[in-house]
Amino acid sequence: MTASPSPLPLSVLDLVPVPRGSDAPAALRETVALAQETERLGYTRFWVAEHHNMGALAASVPAVVLAALSQHTSRLRLGAGGVMLPNHAPLAVAESYRLLSALAPGRVDLGLGRAPGTDGRTALALRGAAGLHEAPFEAQLDDLLAFGHGIFPAGHPFAGVTAAPADTAGRPPLFPPLWVLSSSGYGARVAAGRGLGLAFAAHINPRLEDAAAAVQAYRAAFRPSAAFPEPRSLVAASVVCAPTAEEAEDLAAPLGLMFLRLIRGETAPFPSVAEARAYPYTPHERAQVAASRARVIVGDPAGVREELLALAGRTGADELMLTTLLPDPAARRRSYRLVAEALGLGGPGPGAATEGALFSPGAAPSGG
């Protein structure tokens, strides 16, 4: 089924899954292929998440993956979804994403989260001694903005320190638009007060009333900025789409086993469908799998279309960001294609604006 064109922008959140029997180099090649395919299909942006100490995922340093994607795409907006800010020095983040913007001018987003993206011990190893006395997220965010724009006030210890590479006179600033990742109302407040974008993680918190409340609160308190003259919200959802609902359910089976392993702290590769079907689940584990299944939209194109439009309608999202975790790369690409066709996405025409609905055609995005 191919629907009439829809104004609802769709984007991609990729975790770079490493299926059993594969390896990180192959997973990264598949991510490049997925980015190229979703660009052709008309998706707006392609974000890469940050996770650590997880054998099933290879996206530990999003900026490295995005740098590679910048050389294999031309229109797709590329971003972190997100950088887990407590794991990093704000100046290092500002420099990484200014440099990425130099590789892909006008096409970079920077999503920021306050969770570690891993277990506590690994987070401490990432942060070193500084992790014992880490600054609050909002203080880190303000430092990131100041480094990115070079706006520390006179007398501040970092006054005069600006993230490299430097901007070029007459060209758009390299510091990208910032989005705050949220699964509660906290992120909405932070994003609104600083004039940043809001990305709500409904694939983590599937309570749509929470997403709707966050978006509403964000819009009510939003203060315009150069990057976001108006509020802009996206809601992320986990989706598995196949030609039939039965096949989609079968393909989604590994997600439950992966979830079990994550909560047990295991670092095994992404399980196959056969492995998930053969696993001897205890009654308690089956209940956990059933609970995790509630986070995923699974079905045929018509069913997925209905659920996605309902998600956008109930939350008030300006855009949906889809994450599809499947061990079969071909099935993963097909899922994104089927969703694009079902919602009438349509590929971008020649010379299409890189930002789509967020920035006016021809306008260059400035920092958050």
Image (cartoon, helix red, strand yellow):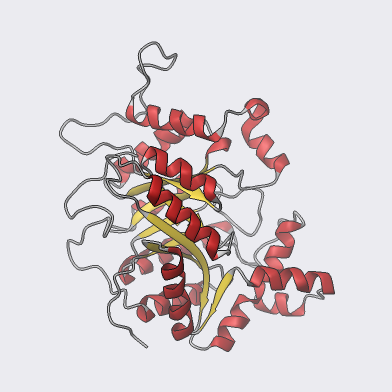
- Residue at 24% across / 68% down in the picture? 348
The quadrant of the picture occupied by the N terminus is: bottom left
Position of residue 334 relative to residue 353, above or below, is: below
Q: Residue furthest top?
A: 155
Q: Residue furthest front?
A: 220
- Residue at 66% across / 56% down in the picture? 55
- Residue at 51% across / 59% down in the picture? 211
Across and down, in percent, residue 314 comes to 45, 68
Across and down, in percent, residue 364 comes to 22, 46
Residue 142: image quadrant is top left
From the viewer's perspective, is 176 left or right of 80? left
Residue 248: image quadrant is bottom right
Number of numbered discs present?
A: 0
Residue 39: image quadrant is bottom left
Residue 15 visible to the viewer: no
From the viewer's perspective, is 37 left or right of 172? right
Of 196 and 86, the residue lying toward us: 196
Of 73 and 291, the residue lying toward us: 291
Across and down, in percent, residue 125 comes to 68, 35
The quadrant of the picture occupied by the C terminus is: top left
Across and down, in percent, residue 170 comes to 15, 34
Residue 9 visible to the viewer: yes
Position of residue 356 relative to residue 341, above or below, is: above
- Residue at 48% across / 65% down in the picture? 30
Position of residue 39 relative to residue 175, above or below, is: below
